[in-house]
Amino acid sequence: MVLKRWVRSKTAMVQFCFGFAAAVVLLAAVASTLVLGQVQRRLLDGESTNSRKTVAQVRYHLSEMDRLMKNLSVLLYADHDVRALMYLSGEETYEHLSVLNKLNATYMKSHPYLQSIFIYNPIKQKFYSTSGRLSDRDASWERLLQSGERLPALKPFIRDLNATGDALSPNPVRVVTYAMYGKLDPQGRMDGAVIVNLRMDGLLEYANAINSTVGGGPDLLFVYDSRNRFNALNAADSESGERIGSQVKAGYEALLANASDQARAPRTSYTVRAGGTQYLVTTAAIRGTGWVVLHAAVYDPAIRQMKTMKTAAIAIGASLAAALLLVSRLLARRLAWPTGLAPDRVPAAERSDQPASPASADVSARLDAWRQSKDQIQEILREQQSSRSLMKRYFLTRLLENGYPVADEEFECARLQYGLNLSSGTPVAVGLLRLDKYAETERHSQPEELEAMRQWIRHVVTESVSRSFACEAVDLKEDRIAWIVHVAPGDGNEGLTEKALGDRLREAQQQLMRQYRISVTISLSGAVPHIRQASTAYHQAVSLSMYRFVLGRKSLITSADIVRKVVPISVDAVFQTERRFIEALQRGDLRAAGERLDACLGLIAEMEYRDMRFALMHLAAGLTHALDATCTWPMNSVRIQEIFDRKRLPEMETIREFRQQLIDAIHETIEASAAAPNDEEAETARKIRLFIQDRHADPKLGVAQIAAELDVSLPAMNRIFENGVGMSIGEYIIHVRLVKAAEWMENSKLSLNEVMRAVGMDNPAYFGKLFKAQFGFTPREYASHLADKRLSP
């Protein structure tokens, strides 16, 4: 009854209206808080995403620049003319000046960002440069040599170059320098070097382009180079630019120190304030260069925009609450008081104003709580982006693959920072695991499946090895996983040797095959006395893993196995057995051919891996040549080579597979030759082939000359030849010239230039490119290997 009377009363209607208004205001406050949170999250994420995009573009382009400059430095260092200048002891001549003019006309013009190329002669202690003078002087380089600082080879660093050669020059040029040298003498001096200087303004132009395309604002770029020197790329040479740079540098050093104290990977972003402006700094290491890029983006506009949105949301919420309260109060008064009854006629106790709603204070409190939790979430996300495991893998990969020189103090710092289960003073060995049939597995698996399989393999092997040895696994991607293992006995593990390590690896290998049907081959290097030599052990393990070709899959390969396997084999004996095999094949005696093929492959299997691959290439080339001479048209060397290419002989993992694919290629060639037609067009194509083979040494040999000589129209001749041979006439001319060039190199003592002219070609670079595409070796590599074989007993 009480409830019924309350519902019927006018007071209940007033209370209901005010309650409804309070609920609407509360919902408006919650909605505004959620909207503000979403806007703030997107705003912060957008700033962070833009910064990461900029850093990713910088890292990509600097990596590409590094790759190009390294290739150029190595190419120049290996050039015979450059090395002649590098070790010149007599007087300079016009020919030496022509070498520098050639560098200017080729590399300097084709690489617009190159500032200069210096060739350092340690005998004369003189520099030869592309400045236009025969000899020059690089005063800043001389000061670097005199300082005794060990300059990194093939790693870029920024320095001031005295363009005039004067040590007191007031206008030094800022350049990025790559130094390529062979070795150092006991005093730390280079035995000759190629110094490639890249214009710094090239990087500045790129940085400005990044600002206009990605950042859209005055973003700044800084780098730590390979000498750990802090440099500004596009910061203005002014007091404000220096102030920003000093704050960025101090913040990064504090970030590293804090990460080292807490034994974790440093964060990839932080904020600094300079000149009343706040900057968001994002860092990224460029692999293989020793550089760390720091991108500073103005952060104040984002903060001001966020504050503006926050103020607008609060104002809108407060206005909405006030409007709803006003409407609700007016409605309640209209319901409570009869029409025409003025408020001044109501008693004072009944006219007392209602207290103000606390909705505005509730919204502010909720925003503060949300902001605090949001900061914690952003901190966790930043830590996940700079994963400790990724940094650890990056450090160990550099240590193994790049021969990264690391001092004991630096290694100890990395051990604490990344939690490495290694120490610097104990002998180590490297085990390298390679997945068998990886190419087939990769073609039939998704990338995430391959990644999961690699992680599981790493887990199984690490679990087996770590029961007796301290070790660290390094995922090298593709088909390779490596382990750095301490082979010296530890506490409670006396008597453990490299043999015990081999037993552990074999146990893991068998477990993977037995339980998961995963076939792997493992190679184990010898022990090296210090962790600094882990790269040597790794490359030894890589070389040993190549012998999977003869030892087969699921092998555990050690250096002792290879010493027992490899015996001195005369290359003449291999070539003689190869000739007997080809002669039996040409006679049609397949049984004898099979026996002699097995004998030839048996001899090849006992050679060193490098000689083994060369002998197999020689076998395949000799076989295609013999089949070309034996088979009928149109089974020429081009079509035979296509059949052999389809068999993917160089990709075979074992010599047994190589033998089977070789036999399949022979059968396919013979069957295709037996089914080949023989008609008038076939005769025309044969004449074209013979004409090209006879006139291949003519540099002017072309389609028009052949058509005129054979009295055939150009369209008909191209159609007949391409239908019969499977390639154009121009491609066949190149093929014949390359085959003849290889024959000249093998059977004569002509120089490479003479060989090139003998086959009608006059462009060394083009000739080298085509030769490597055809045979897998450059002309110099092919000639060098032939020379080694002639000198070997």
Image (spheres, rainbow, N blue to C red):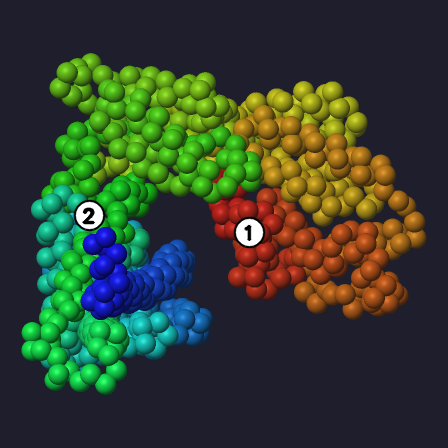
Q: Amino acid at mark 1?
A: Lys
Which of disc 1 and disc 2 is earlier in sequence? 2
Residue 312 visible to the viewer: no
Residue at image coords 78%, 51%: 725
Image location of residue 347, percent across then percent down = 9, 78
Q: Which residue is mark 2?
A: 265
Q: Nearer the viewer, residue 411 or 131?
A: 411
- Residue 17's tag is none
Disc sitting over residue 772 in the figure: 1
Q: Nearer the viewer, residue 87 or 460?
A: 460
Q: Position of residue 547 (x, y in %)?
A: 46, 28
C-alpha span from label 2 to label 1: 44 Å
Which residue appears at 79% of the width and 27% of the height? 588
Locate residue 199, reporting x and y percent.
30, 73
Q: In this orientation, which residue lies closer to the viewer: 455 or 693?
A: 455
Dot 2 lies on which element? Answer: loop
User: Which of the 4 image quadrants contains residue 497?
Assistant: top left
